[in-house]
Image: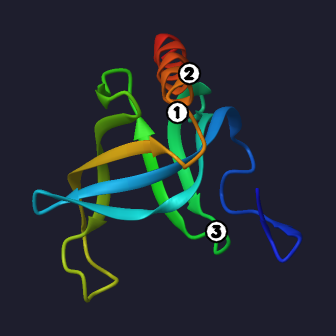
Amino acid sequence: MAKLAGKEVDAGDAEDSTVYELKGRVRELVDMKWVERGTGEVKLNTYCAGKGGKVKARLLCRRALTLKTILNAVIGKETSFVKRTEKAVQFTTFEQQPKEKEEEDVDLEIVPKTYMLTPAKGEGPAKIDRLLQEIKKVQGTM
């Protein structure tokens, strides 16, 4: 649930359980350059999918103030997280996007996207370490 103008709005994650969250900055690797997507609450969420109720996980981040989704990355059992610096972790996930950007009714293709997460100013490197620990715990249940 997201709060917009003081009211709760279902943003598609009402059924998720938040395992861990931190204020962080999200960057995406685009044409071999890191492009900042924004700063907001980065949440490690779990949810049940399908009839069997299999546990799945994702990293979700909405930009502060506007609540625009800047990261919604599904985490698989094999998703690798690499600590690049004391405060930065990099990972690659696969996302769906339209094959043709101009048309809405087109087939979707799956493309790899690489992200870098760092804690927001004032947050220490321990936040990234804890996030990585929680991700490993969740991946162990998949």
Q: Residue furthest front?
A: 122
Q: Amino acid at mark 2?
A: Arg
Q: Give the vertical position of 1 relative to 94 (above or below).
A: below
Q: Can you tell which mark lies on residue 57?
A: 1
Q: Image quadrant of residue 100?
A: bottom left
Q: Which badge, 1 or 2, is on the more N-terminal residue? A: 1
Q: Amino acid at mark 3?
A: Leu
Q: Can you tell which mark lies on residue 68?
A: none
Residue underneath mark 3? 67
**SS state under label 3:** loop
As drawn, is 73 to the left or to the right of 21?
left
**SS state under label 2:** helix
Q: Give the class, few, some or many, for how many residues have Cα within 10 Å of label 3's Cα (few <14, many ≥20).
A: some
User: As rendered, which of 50 and 32 lies closer to the eye?
Assistant: 32
Residue underneath mark 2? 130
Q: Image quadrant of residue 53?
A: top right
As drawn, is 106 to the left or to the right of 127?
left
Q: Give the class, few, some or many, for how many residues have Cα within 10 Å of label 2's Cα (few <14, many ≥20).
A: some
Nearer the observer: mark 1 or 2; the answer is 2
